[in-house]
Amino acid sequence: MAFDLDAFQTAAREKYESLAACAVLYYERHSLVELARDFLILWYLLGWVASLLRVAYAYGPVRSATMLYRRWAKRFYRAVLKLPIMRRKVDSEVREVKKQLEHSLLVKASTSYNEVPEYGLTEKEVIDKLDELSRLKAANWKDGKLSGAVYHGGDELIDLQSQAYHKFAVANQLHPDAFPGVRQMEAEVVSMVLRLFNAPESGCGTTTSGGTESLLLACLAAREKARAERGLKEFEIIAPKTVHAAIFKASQYFNMKLHLVDLDENYIGNLTQIRRLINKNTCLLVGSAPNFPHGLVDDIAGLSQLAVQHRIPLHVDCCLGSFVIAYYEKAFQKALDPFDFRLPGVTSISCDTHKYGFAPKGSSIIMYRSNEYRKYQYFVSTEWVGGLYGSPTLAGSRPGALTVGAWATMVYMGDDGYTKACQDIILTARRLRQTIEEEIPELQIIGNPQLSVVAFRSDKLNIHKLGDMLGKKGWHLSALQHPPALHLAVTKLTVPAIDTLLLELKAAVKQLALEKTDIQSDTAQLYGVANSLQTGSVADQLIGCFLDTLYQTEPTL
Ligand SMILES: *Cc1c(COP(=O)(O)O)cnc(C)c1O
Ligand SMILES: *[C@@H]1O[C@H](CO)[C@@H](O)[C@H](O)[C@H]1NC(C)=O
């Protein structure tokens, strides 16, 4: 039958007319209030559908479907785990793990003080107790067998830091008038680090208690900026899924939605996905240089371009890279891909002075391109009964002695000291990478790590079992998931220990290859809780259990 255009047009007109008639009828039958209500509901629904479509477009149909499935599966498992029979089973497994945790964590000295002692101890008694407590160890970090954790700059440096602490033990940065020397040192520490990351003249920043606080502040400042300047009410962050957990924390604390982006074939954030996820609520892009899990640097130049194009702030997490990435160019006469303020889109950078800056723990810097960004991290109250109050970071009182420790460390190390440390650390990481690539075919390096962290996985062995075997030899490599892998963050302490590690790694791989174990690996290896629980649904209970155990003075099981 031929297509009858006239008939179609007539039908369409009739339909349209009846549709219009419906609308008129609807309009006549409803009050203005009802119409407004319906309009708002429709508007809200359309917005919701649009944001759903946008996410589906960014992740692609397959990935979106799995994300949706995972979310529902998780809810389903949660519900199932609440059933009485299941709950009993889970409780007994959690109990078992708790027993192991108490056994491994509650390593204690001969006497304990669960209450303030009735009479104070003498100085000698206290020092003796401290000696005993410092001898308790589960992991021998001094042998360089612990990944990351202790970044240590040598014994003389520790003496220097102790003296610095002694001189400024009572200093509080909340009272700059009482401690002008500390104020000067804080300003100088920030200025030195700004230079290292090629900040423009307008660059500024503050010291913080650590990388987590720096990242929290970067997110908070971005949120407040978006609220003040763009009038946003909802806030979204876009970051590769390898971004540090502190960004997850910021998302939760500050009620910002976090879009986690998949990795591309080089194991760094997929830029296409990032571009597609950007919308009117996006108030921050985050990239890492490098990230914690795999030690890889995201495409910061690509992110910078997106940031400029869409006028969104971009934070670069150099917490881990810290002075190793900052001194790379000097140490090897070779530039890395750009990652710092030289890229126009980079608006903030975090750098942990307590990592490869070798400052005492509790020291990090958050930097901004200008005060137009930093001012939004400040807290100001003019109404408090306690008086006018202003505080630059999350903490109120701040231990000035730690900033002094960072200052003393930086001027003691100097460019020459940091350059040498950077060379030693990176050459050691390269040896680990090369040995695995050339001599251990069972293991595969993840991505192209150029800095201090090297991560590897295996398509033949159970990688977490390998981690356990190395653990028995005293090595503590970090256990990663999605995909299961191990990583070593090389520190100054690892440099002399690398030969032993390579020998023991090869031996362990050989031994494991002989045992026929399945490659499947559980995700409950977090915090070294290696056990049989396969489902991620119980993992959160286990982590809570781990945290509870930390504050126990006595075992309960
Ligand atoms: C260590 C680290 C941080 C911050 O961790 P803190 O423990 O709070 O100092 C942030 N990002 C990366 C990539 C890190 O490795
Ligand atoms: C990056 O993401 C886009 C959009 O989801 C997808 O089409 C593309 O295949 C991804 N690239 C890689 C390498 O995974």
Image (cartoon, helix red, strand yellow):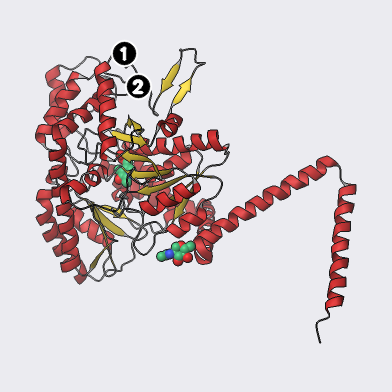
Q: CA distance from mark 2 to mark 1?
A: 14 Å
Quadrant of the displayed image that contains ligand 1: top left
Residue 465 place in picture, x, y as percent? 25, 60
Which element type, helix, strand or loop, lies under badge 1? loop
Residue type for callout 1:
Asp
Q: Residues within 10 Å of mark 1 (few under 14, many from 20)?
A: few
Residue 240 on image: x %, y %:
41, 53
Number of other residues with Cα within 10 Å of mark 2, as a class: few under 14, some 14 to 19, many 20 or more? few
Q: Which numbered circle lies on residue 177?
A: 1
Could you tell me which residue is drawn at 38 percent across and 37 percent down?
A: 369
Q: Of residues 521 and 532, which is closer to you in this image?
A: 521
Can residue 526 be seen?
yes
Dot 2 falls on a residue whose secondary structure is loop
What residue is shown with label 2?
A: 397
Residue situated in front as seen by the camera: 212 or 22: 22
Residue placed at 12% from the left, 54% from the top? 498
Q: Residue at x 23, y 60 (%)?
A: 466
Q: Which label's residue is closer to the chain start, 2 or 1?
A: 1
Q: Position of residue 88 (x, y in %)?
A: 46, 51
Q: Is residue 303 above or below residue 412?
A: below
Task: Name which residue type carries label 2.
Answer: Ser
